[in-house]
């Protein structure tokens, strides 16, 4: 799937922006604060979840009006097209429609794959495990759309079990029902993550790329993770007293962490230079896209925010070459047009400026 048209209404700094696109990469440039990233954020909402900024619906409304907002996109792929619209009125929850019919967000994961790399991810390897879990879950979701449903099921059961633990409930029957759901969904979440990392490893192996291979390991947490549902249920039952003392569930994929190493150097990602850490992230996003591209029906949309500014000329050329070879639609931002000069006529260019608090977008074609 690729975006053929995109309309933003009262979304962030965009009062009304209409864009048309083709299969080429889209290079968006303009000063900081002009509204470039807001375009990428709107596109990121075409996938399940809270988008690349993880903002609430109210936070995305244009101020000071706060009237609510709407995003509309026409998506097309081999032999198919779909109209997607998302509306949030008066600070309320987002409402999704696909082909003018109400749809759950999980449906987006079956419709289109969206991958992104934003500056806030630059500290991924040196900050807390929660961000790395989100990172691996987004990659996993791109391969297995059902991963979103399993994760939601797991989180719901865990919240309910944690409430019982905090309230000091001792009824075995209540715990047994929740632990059955936890074991089933938790094992599925862990297995899907492991399968996604295997796909990434295969996509990196032998690939002609200027970016370093990242060796990934999924650490299940200090207590480990049982290998079957029966073992998982038994472990949860045995851990109730300890969990009650802690006030939370201590076994499961919510305790997992993703570790990475610069394979050629054998160095943990957290100990690499800032530039090397960025290169590893780009390598993983490209490997994710490469793995999906093995099935032409799953070519992802890439969102790369300010990525070119942190690369030298050779690395920029290598990145653009890989994107063009993949044939995937990439939306990229930068402050200056020269960051995208190496793309030549292979890219569509948009210039964004801010006037009176409103983003103005000019389509420059390939010029």
Image: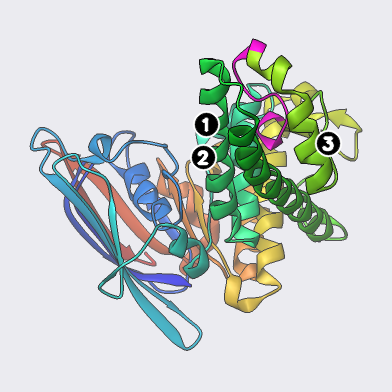
Quarter of the image holding residue 16?
Answer: bottom left
Mark 2 and mark 3 residues within 8 Å of each other at the beta carbon:
no
Disc 2 is placed on an element classified as: helix
Disc 1 is placed on an element classified as: helix
Direction top: furthest residue: 245
Q: Image check: 56 left or right of 258?
A: left
Q: Image check: 296 left or right of 13?
A: right
Direction bottom: furthest residue: 79
N-term-proximal mark, 2 vs 3: 2
Kindly identify which residue carries mark 1: 159
Residue 36 makes an appearance in the image: yes
**The magenta segment:** 245-255
N-term-proximal mark, 3 vs 1: 1
Q: Residue sitting at 51 percent across and 32 percent down?
A: 160
Residue 219 makes an appearance in the image: no
Which quadrant would the C terminus be assigned to in this image? bottom left
Color theme of the render: rainbow
Q: Image check: 78 left or right of 170?
A: left
Q: Position of residue 307 (x, y in %)?
A: 54, 42
Kindly identify which residue carries mark 3: 262
Kindly identify which residue carries mark 2: 156
Q: Position of residue 345 (x, y in %)?
A: 47, 69
Q: Position of residue 12 (x, y in %)?
A: 23, 41
Q: Residue sitting at 71 percent across and 56 percent down?
A: 287
Mark 2 and mark 1 residues within 8 Å of each other at the beta carbon:
yes
Examine the rendered structure and indicate whether residue 353 appears above or below residue 160. Answer: below
Nearest the viewer among 64 and 322 is 64
Examine the rendered structure and indicate whether residue 82 appears above or below residue 154. Answer: below
Examine the rendered structure and indicate whether residue 86 appears above or below residue 94. Answer: below
Disc 3 is placed on an element classified as: strand
Q: How many marks?
A: 3
């Amino acid at each position: 799937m690729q975006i053929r048209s995109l309309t933003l209404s009262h979304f962030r700094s965009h009062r009304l922006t209409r864009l048309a696109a083709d299969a080429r990469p889209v290079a968006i440039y303009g000063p900081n604060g002009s509204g470039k990233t807001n375009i990428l954020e709107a596109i990121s909402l075409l996938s399940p979840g809270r988008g690349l900024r993880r903002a609430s619906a109210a936070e995305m409304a244009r101020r000071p009006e706060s009237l609510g907002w709407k995003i509309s996109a026409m998506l097309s792929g081999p032999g198919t097209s779909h109209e997607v619209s998302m509306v949030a009125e008066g600070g309320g929850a987002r409402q999704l429609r696909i082909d003018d019919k109400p749809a759950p967000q999980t449906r987006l994961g079956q419709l289109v794959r969206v991958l992104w790399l934003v500056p806030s991810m630059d500290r991924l390897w040196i900050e807390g495990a929660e961000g790395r879990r989100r990172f691996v879950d987004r990659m996993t979701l791109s391969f297995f759309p059902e991963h979103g449903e399993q994760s939601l099921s797991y989180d719901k059961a865990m919240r309910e079990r944690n409430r019982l633990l905090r309230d000091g409930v001792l009824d075995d029957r209540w715990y047994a029902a929740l632990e059955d759901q936890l074991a089933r969904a938790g094992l599925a979440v862990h297995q899907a993550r492991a399968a996604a990392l295997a796909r990434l490893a295969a996509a990196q192996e032998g690939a002609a790329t200027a970016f370093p291979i990242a060796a990934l390991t999924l650490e299940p947490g200090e207590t480990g993770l049982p290998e079957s549902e029966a073992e998982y249920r038994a472990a949860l039952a045995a851990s109730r007293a300890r969990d009650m003392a802690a006030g939370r569930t201590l076994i499961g994929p919510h305790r997992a962490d993703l570790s990475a190493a610069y394979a050629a150097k054998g160095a943990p990602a957290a100990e690499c230079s800032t530039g090397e850490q960025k290169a590893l992230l780009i390598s993983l996003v490209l490997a994710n896209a490469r793995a999906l591209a093995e099935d032409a029906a799953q070519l992802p949309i890439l969102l790369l925010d300010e990525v070119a500014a942190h690369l030298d000329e050779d690395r920029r050329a290598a990145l653009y070459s890989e994107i063009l070879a993949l044939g995937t639609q990439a939306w990229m931002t930068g402050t200056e047009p020269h960051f995208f000069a190496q793309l030549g006529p292979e890219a569509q260019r948009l210039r964004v400026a801010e006037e009176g608090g409103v983003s103005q977008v000019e389509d420059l074609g390939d010029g």
